[in-house]
Image (spheres, grey):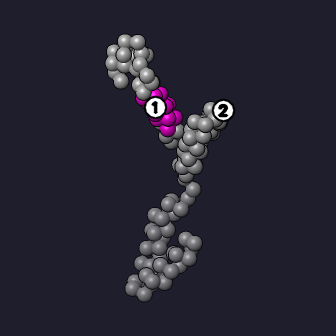
């Protein structure tokens, strides 16, 4: 695909400049653009982040699914340094679960009173 694009660019540029300038321009474009078409390691981070989020979402119904986080995170940590996004997603899920549990405990009868689980009235 890149080859066809460079060939089309060569034909277009050859109409306006000479063969030496056209060749120099194409070499510059090919070396500049070439890095954008290579497979980069961070490309593995996007599907792994999605997999971590799927495991975390499925872990609400079935906590046994959370065991898949260990091999996912080990593989991700060995692939790319963006594994920290997975750690952040896990931390956010834990924080969200703690906040949800705290809110649930405040809705229970007797919450926030001297007899309830929170005697200071924080609810």
Q: Which residues are magenta?
A: 89-104
Across and down, in percent, residue 69 comes to 61, 35
Q: Relative to 9, does residue 58 appear above or below in the rendering?
A: above
Q: Relative to 79, does residue 24 appear above or below in the rendering?
A: below
Considering depth in this image, is 106 or 84 the residue closer to the camera?
106
Which quadrant of the figure has residue 111? top left
Q: Is any part of residue 40 visible from this angle?
A: yes
Label 1 residue SS:
helix
Is 70 displayed left or right of 85 in the figure? right
Q: Classify mark 1: residues with Cα within 10 Å, few (<14), some (14-19) or many (20+).
A: few
**Furthest residue toward front:** 109
Across and down, in percent, residue 39 comes to 57, 56
What residue do we see at 45% from left, 83% from top? 12
Q: What main secondary structure does the magenta stretch of the protein show?
A: helix
Total label count?
Answer: 2
Considering depth in this image, is 51 or 101 the residue closer to the camera?
101
Name the residue that disc number 2 marks. 64
Name the residue that disc number 1 marks. 100
Nearer mark to the viewer, of 2 and 1: 1
């Amino acid at each position: 695909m890149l080859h066809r694009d460079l060939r089309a660019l060569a034909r277009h540029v050859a109409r306006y400049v000479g063969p030496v300038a056209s060749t120099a321009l194409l070499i510059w474009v090919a070396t500049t653009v070439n890095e954008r078409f290579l497979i980069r390691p961070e490309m593995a981070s996007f599907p792994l982040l999605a997999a971590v989020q799927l495991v975390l979402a499925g872990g609400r119904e079935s906590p046994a699914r959370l065991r898949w986080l260990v091999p996912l995170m080990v593989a991700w940590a060995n692939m790319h340094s963006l594994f920290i996004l997975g750690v952040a997603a896990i931390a956010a899920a834990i924080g969200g679960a703690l906040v949800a549990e705290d809110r649930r405990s405040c809705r229970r009868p007797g919450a926030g009173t001297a007899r309830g689980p929170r005697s200071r009235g924080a609810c």
